[in-house]
Amino acid sequence: MGWTMRRRDLLKNVGLAAGALALAPRAFAADGDLTVTITLNGKDLVFKQSAGIDLGDYKASRFTQRCVRTDLAGSPLSVFFRPDRNSDRVEIVVELGRLWGKANEAAAHLGAYRTVIAKGGRELATVDVPRHWWFARWRWQSEPRPVVRKPAELIKAKLLPPYAESAARLAEPAQQSKPPVYRHPMDTGGLQTSVGAAGERLELGPITEYQGDYIVTGSERALAALRAQAEAAASMPMHMRDEKTNAPIDFFQYPNADWYYEPHGNPWIKGTEAIRDAEGHVTCEWSLDTSHDPALNYVPFLLTEDPFHLEELQFQGNQTLGYTSYHRGENELQIVYPGETRSFAWSMRTMFQLAKVTPDSTPKWLKPRAYWKHIVDDNLKWFTAHYVTNPAPITSVFAAGPRIDEVAAWQEDFVAFCLGWGVLLGFEDWRNAFRWKLKSTLARTSGKSGWPRQWCSPYYLSLATADSHSMYAERSPESIWLKSWSGAWKRFAADKQNEVEEPFADDTSWAQHNSPDFLIYTRGVLALAAQLGIDDAREPLAFVERMVSGTGYMKYKWAVASP
């Protein structure tokens, strides 16, 4: 299978083709200052590398990249000059936004502007920017970083789950009416801009469908799509860089900071949800949501070692904290947003990744590994105390959480998968939490708990006889919780809205009316658990795989191999 593609084709698919950006010849003069001239509202803003602040080098295995930040008085734009020290590659990053003081109070999006990038007076590129969202960014690069690692190497290193063609045999290549292409700054790359919109989407899951396709098949089409979507992540208004430190904001320095749509945080940072028109409508096309957080940059970073993708991942990690400070303040820990079970799943996926692949020592413009490990540790402390060791039936019998008032089994499986991935990445202190959460998946698929495994992935089920008004079981009377999985099934089956028709046609066919996506979530958890050496998952996995075969359906992003 092919792991590389022609440079012209790759440039086209990540938005660097002629027409979007004017590329200069690859060979640049060794001397001459790099400059960026932005023409906005009839005024030229000239940013010079020679006038900037050197923020330190990022050293990868095959290159060393500089980072020089330049600002101009009165402008909320920052330009980062990032040429390589050991090659002629040049990269320019343009960011909009300030966290503090009057500059943040004056938060506003920018309209169209033109950017001219030059070296020693010789023009390298002209970039027309149609608009620029507050706390968004874009980059120009003289050439993309090449793919330097094969997926098989990443799987062997346990940086990725063991995706395999044997598990993906029913999957089909991802199809969109318009293939993902990143054409210009603020382009969406085919991503859903209303990130919280309901429904299964190609970009949602442990990885994206295009990433899964590439990992399994080596498809160049899928590689181009995943790279385009990674570039489009820069358009998301989540790039909260502390202008005092030049790195993403530090939530241990500002434990109660947030950019909630109303001024609740301390300090409260004005983000895009607070930028509204005269009628009170949010004016940015993006609406972010941690419960549907797409995994856009981890895989591209692993493939290319491009620090731009690691930086994107860091901004994304901080977004899961800065979304709201309520739960962080209540618990006095830097925990990710737990208001939806799936939010905890996807946010921990990102935090595990950051705590694994971020270098111990980083230049000033990145947070070091210890920062992300501290966040992972805070979440383990919180999750263990409120869920893993909680004796209430909702947690000790049903292993439900973080949401316990209305339990979505498929979201429980999301959490189980992401915690299992954390263990795979080397976070052994999370194994007990993973085993605890896995109890839910095993109870629904073993055929031994009293819950029929032909209905292993219920959409929602109530496990209480009265309303629970808290996320934490210790704040509700213990008497309200059901005591067994058999009792939970009787109650579920008796609810006419669930449309359960008993007896089932046979003992081996999936009986649910839901989308087959729910079944492959469950299968993915069991496959990962079996890969992690949990023998109790093997027989349920074999059973669920028979049901999956009956549906004739699979997605690459869930196609973890059976051991």
Image: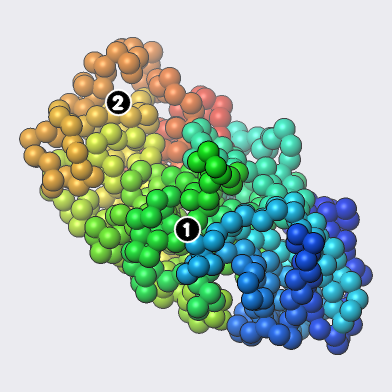
Q: CA distance from mark 1 to mark 2?
A: 49 Å
**Would residue 127 be seen by someone viewing this image from the given angle?**
yes
Query: Local crowd at mark 1 within 10 Å, few (<14), some, or many (≥20)?
Result: many
Q: Disc 2 designates what residue?
A: 452
The quarter of the displayed image where residue 23 is located: bottom right
| 130 lies left or right of 516 | right
| 473 lies left or right of 513 | left
Residue at x-position 11% and y-position 33%: 480
Q: State the image coordinates of residue 262 (x, y, percent, origin top left).
A: 40, 51
Query: Local crowd at mark 2 within 10 Å, few (<14), some, or many (≥20)?
Result: some
Count the marks: 2
The quarter of the displayed image where residue 453 is located: top left
Q: Nearer the viewer, residue 535 or 248?
A: 248
Residue at the far front in the pictured view: 278
Q: Amino acid at mark 2?
A: Pro
Q: Amino acid at mark 1?
A: Lys
Residue at x-position 29% and y-position 46%: 402
Up-down relation of residue 116 to residue 16 (above or below) = below
Q: Disc 1 designates what residue?
A: 270
SS under mark 2: loop
| 561 lies left or right of 327 | right
